[in-house]
Each structure stands twice: as C-alpha cells, then as structure tokens.
Image (cartoon, rainbow, N blue to C red):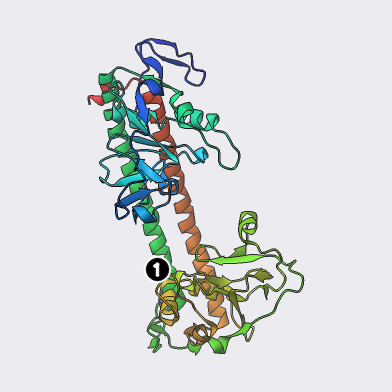
Amino acid sequence: MKLSPYPKYKPSGVEWLGEVPEEWDICRLKYVSSVNDDVLGENTDPDFEMIYVDISGVDSLSGIQKKESIRFESAPSRARRKVCNGDVIVSTVRTYLRAIVPIVDPDDNLIVSTGFAVIRPKSKMDSSFAAYVLRAPYFVDSVVARSVGVSYPAINASDLLDLSIVLPQHTEQLTIAAFLDRETARIDALIAKKLRQIELLQEKRATLISHVLTHGLNINVQLKGSDVKWLGEIPAHWNVFRAKVVFCEVNERSKSGQEELLTVSHITGVTRRSGKDVNMFMAETLEGYKKCDAGDLVINTMWAWMGAMGMAMEDGIVSPSYNVYRFRKPKHDPRYYDLLFRTKRFISEVICQSQGVWSSRLRLYPESFLEIRIPCPPLGEQRMMVEAIERETGHFEILKQKIESSISTLREYRIALISAAVTGKIDVRKEALL
C-alpha cells in the first residue's frame, strides 16, 4: 500500500512526535479522557461473581487472553477496577510489558486489576481512535520513559494523564480508526493463516516421527502385532520388552553439587538449566542432587504426563524429585528413545500408568514406568531412524523459521502502520473510503 503524507505539517512541540498535520491538535490526555471512574466498593456483596483480569492475562497484540471467574470475598484486593465498552486499560506497573488494550463489549461483571489505569475517552476523543492512539509506539514509549523503579517500573495515574497525544477532528478520528480496523484485520488474518501453517507443520513432523519410530524406514517390511495398545503393529524382527529389561533405576548422589545443573521439560527435553531458572529455583546447596550421565533417561515424575522426559546428552545433576534410569546394556541409541518417549502415543501410555488425580497430581513412579512395554529395534536401525528423522525435521525447521520470520515482519508492519496513521505521517482518508 502506497500512502501519501498530509499536504501541510506543523511542529508538534513534542520531541518524540516531531511534525504533525497542520489541522491536528496536540493536547494532554487529561483534557480528553478521565481515569479510574468506577471501582468496586468494600461493601460489595461477598457472593458477587466477577470475571477478573490481571496484568499477566493481557497481551498488547492479542488483547485479553486470560480471565478468572471468582467471588468478591475470595478475590485479591487489587480486583477493583470496573470497565465499560470503549475504555482502554493501561498497565501502570511493570510498564515494560506494554500491556495496553481496548475494552470491547465486555461482560457486565468484568473487573480489572488496580495495576491498570482505566482510561475513558470524553466527547473530543472517540473510543475507536483511542484504542489505537493509546497503543501507538510513541505513547507506549512515553509511558515506559515516565515510569519509576527498576524491578517493577510504574507510573501513577496523574503522570499518565499528563502525557501528550495527537488529536485530529472527530470525523477524521473515525476515518482513521475505520481504516486501521480494516487493515489490521487483514494483517491479523494473514498472521492467523501463517500460525496455522506452523501448527500443520508441527503435526506433520510429529506424525512422521511417530510412524518412523514404530514402523521403521522400510515401507515393505513385514509387520506383526505387538500386543501393546499404544504401540500397535511393528516390524516382525523387532523385540518388545518391559522397560525394566532395558533400563534400571539409578540413584547416585552428588557429593559436591558442582556438576552441571540440568532440567527436563516437555519442550526441550533434558537441557542445561538457565541462569534465570537457577536464580529462581536453585536450592541453597546442590549437594545430594541426583547424578546422571550422558545417555541416561531422566523423567520429571510430576510432569511426565506432559512429556517432560528425555535422554541426557551430557553429564550433570538433576533435582532429587526426578527419576534417573540407565541402559542395562550399551546396545541402544539414546537419541531413539529420546524421540520415542516424547511422542503422543507414548505419552498416552504414560498417562494410563501414572497415579493420582488427573493433570495436577498425576505422578509416574519408577515401578509404573518400568512395567511399560517398549519397542527395541536393532541398534543399527535405531541409528538410521534417528538420522532420517533429523534430516527430514531439518527441512521442517527451515520452513518454520521462514514462516516465523514473515509473521514477525507482519507484526512489525502492523505496529508501524498504526503509528504512522495516528501520528499523521500518512494520510489515510482516501484509502479509508475504498
């Protein structure tokens, strides 16, 4: 889209705005909006059921992503701000999160945290325009710049209202908002399609991995029933054993706590724990943590049902709450089982064998894991399958990166388009009529 600038500009008097269209006004937010007009009083009925939104539930690009249904008597003391259609909520704490979103057709009982300032446009500023101008980079940057504090930078409501914004005439506000509604909807639709492409790639990748690991690479191979529900048919020359035939549990403890600290998740498998994780979760001493060698299987007892397990690719130590297993004989490729144990098919069996209440308290204990029946192809085939999967998934990763790059470009363009339109750097009045 090729858009022209306005015919004439004037200095805005605001350093980060530069010049603005000659007919536009510059004013402080407090002259065209109010803030925090409505709050829940302390005399609210204790049984009042609210839908609560905290700062963590808001994303500047996608809007409100998480809501919690809660009674007033059980709600946190910060659950007090009332909102209505057309408001814009601006995070005044942890402002670096840039959590600013418009409120559109909210539930009657929607309540947001006092960590938000609820901006309510007055007659001179249309709510549709406010939804964009208050999310423009120049305004968000000025909110962050005015914030005070290091760990939890914050801005108070009076300083927020003191910030300057650009304001065209009311009819032009509507025109700009209509143009941005249309164009951002197009961009969002493109992004949604590309995100779906990534989902399909991941599904295709998972299907490929699962099929190869349980059927091998030879499409003409003779199959046999494995008598294992999660496994199905396998090549006739493969063996099936209980995990206890292949693995034994080990419980070696660190005496110094100086080894590399590892963690295990359903996303990364077994990896080095990041410095951030160490600062948040590391005990005072790592002495007594479980040792694991490269090639050992590590299972997160609590989150195994999510796929939090994998083969350690280096020596290290893990939390005592993890279980560590070692091959009884060196005739297996750890990479094969690292892939196998995180397939959906195997995880379905893990869920069946886990004990406890669904999801939040499910645990996969050693006695249950060691009874699970697993395929044992010849070592040479294990290696060939892993290498084939690495080649094919490498192609998937390249495609995924290209799609992710295009999504990033679209998101940057979306932000730039909004910024240019609401600051008058481009004239969208003719385009809005098309």
Q: Tell me if residue 314 comes above or below residue 164 in the rendering.
A: below
- Quadrant where the C terminus lies? top left
Residue situated in front as seen by the camera: 292 or 332: 292
**Residue 105: percent from left, percent from top:** 25, 41
**Residue 367: percent from left, percent from top:** 52, 86
Q: Quadrant of residue 83?
A: top left
Q: Quadrant of residue 293?
A: bottom right
Task: Find disc 1 in the rendering and name its residue.
Answer: 207
**Horizontal arrangement in the rendering, residue 165 relative to residue 315 (left or right):** left
Q: Tell me if residue 140 comes above or below residue 249 in the rendering.
A: above
Q: Amino acid at mark 1?
A: Thr
Q: Tell me if residue 158 comes above or below residue 398 in the rendering.
A: above
| Visible residue check, residue 218 | no
**Residue 191: percent from left, percent from top:** 36, 45
**Which residue shows up at 32% across the image and 34% down it?**
87
Q: Is disc 1 placed on a helix, strand or loop?
A: helix
Most extreme residue toward the left is 433
Q: Quadrant of residue 100?
A: top left
Residue situated in front as seen by the camera: 91 or 368: 91
**Which residue shows up at 54% across the image and 77% down it?**
382
**How many numbered badges does the structure rendering display?**
1
- Quadrant where the N terminus lies? top left
User: Badge 1: how crowded within 10 Å, few (<14), some, or many (20+)?
Assistant: few
| Visible residue check, residue 429 | yes
Q: Tell me if residue 285 comes above or below residue 9 in the rendering.
A: below
**Horizontal arrangement in the rendering, residue 364 relative to residue 51 (left or right):** right
Most extreme residue toward the front is 43
**Residue 217: percent from left, percent from top:** 46, 75
Residue situated in front as seen by the camera: 190 or 114: 114
